[in-house]
Image (cartoon, rainbow, N blue to C red):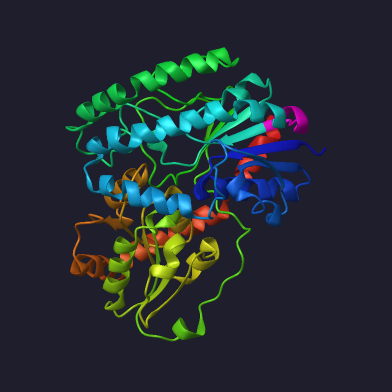
Amino acid sequence: MSKTIIFFPEGAYGPTNNCVGIGDVLRRRGHRVVFVIEESFAGTLEAKGFEERLMRLTPPPEEEEVPGQFWKDFIRDTAPVFRKPTIEQIREFTAPTFEALLDGARYVDDRLREIFNEVQPDVIVEDNVLTFPAILASGKPWVRVVSCNPAEVKDDDVPPPFSGYPTADRSAWPAYRDEYAAAHVELHGSFSAFCVERGAPALPEGEFMHESDWLNLYLYPEVVDYERAAPLGPTWHNLQTSVRATDDAWEVPDALRDGPGALIYLSLGSLGSADVELMQGLIDTMGASGHRVIVSKGPQHDLLTLHDNMVGAEFLPQTSVLPHVDLVITHGGNNTVTESLFFGKPMVLLPLFWDQYDNAQRIHETGFGVRLDTYGHTPEELRGAVDGLLANSALLARLAGVASELQAAPGTARAADLIEQLL
């Protein structure tokens, strides 16, 4: 019997794309799938065949919004912080980001209640890093999806989230955890009170997100997942990956099909690619690499100059590109990392913020890639990392095995099964 399922992802490409992959499976099984999205995403989910309900997390601007301008301004104002150690980023980036997100949750609460009353969902699926009280107050079953690095779900044996610290060296963990707690204590108290005021339970200690009583999902291949001191409860399930099948088809352009060297995919995500100086430096480095390069150029695409051994575009259908390439240079976003493993590709990781540090460190210490200093590496180090990974036949064989296992059990189908069981 057809059910109505609301997906409410964070207003970013990563969580949205993750939910699209799961929603697509459920839609194909005959369910009604409705996406609650920010106005800036209007039409993008409809074009993929889903219903949309629009909302805002901030008041409307006085002047008309220019698409992509938010990210350009964000990078301009914030990029200097990304050059600092992660413990210094806590008060200068992490806490202010949470503050802005929490303000958005307050602003949108009434609109969410309107949407839930209108749509009357059978279940609500939330992929976010914080609670929205309207979901818990709705009385509907709801699903929590963690599409960030699973260090977000804290554990004594897992490095602190957003730190990028190694699992084998715990010396810096206590100071980071103390600083993280101190920086967020007031935000936590005020938002917990708001949750109670709006009919939701108080927040768990030290968390901005509730655990669902019904179903909790995360996605991280077991081969790189963390060992935990306290196993997750019975409502938790690891999808391993969640690779959508909705991207447009893509083929290697004629200009690069028969060229020399390997085929490399360069992407720093929608945010990282807005740092023109960083992106152009990487492009110039790889221009002298002897390899062919596919560049995801991002919102500042018109300011980037490619070399003769490259092609690129503002947006690329990433899950259609990855099967064709030999290696990925990435910022370490969770989607790109898990998708690269799904297709068996080694990675060079250049983290910028949030869980990208955790992903970069975890891939480095498990041997599936190389983490470099994003702003401090030399061109020789980057090209050397690329060539070293491509020459590592044992690693490439290991990755092929990982890809075979992941593709045999797609996480999107597993998620759809679990949601249907809940329904």
In which quadrant will I find the C terminus? top right
- Image x and y of residue 28, in percent: 74, 51
Q: Is residue 66 visible?
A: yes
Q: Is residue 296 visible?
A: no
Looking at this view, is 325 or 254 the one in front?
Answer: 254
Q: Does residue 122 show up magenta in the picture?
A: yes
Looking at this view, is 279 or 336 the one in front?
Answer: 279
> Farthest front residue?
62
Looking at this view, is 206 or 242 the one in front?
Answer: 206
Dividing the picture into quadrants, the one containing residue 93 is top left
- Image x and y of residue 222, in percent: 43, 44
Q: Residue at x 28, y 77 (%)?
A: 289
Dividing the picture into quadrants, the one containing residue 206 is top left
Q: Is residue 141 shown left or right of residue 325?
A: right
Looking at this view, is 67 or 271 the one in front?
Answer: 67
- Image x and y of residue 323, in percent: 50, 67
The magenta region covers 116-123
Residue 109 against residue 321 in the figure, above or below? above
Q: Residue at x 26, y 48 (%)?
A: 80
Residue 330 against residue 361 in the figure, above or below? below
Q: Does residue 181 show up magenta in the picture?
A: no
Residue 78 against residue 169 in the figure, above or below? below
- Image x and y of residue 278, in percent: 30, 61
Q: Is residue 323 shown left or right of residue 327?
A: right
Q: Is residue 320 shown left or right of residue 373?
A: right
Residue 94 against residue 329 in the figure, above or below? above
Q: Residue at x 43, y 48 (%)?
A: 334
In which quadrant will I find the N terminus? top right
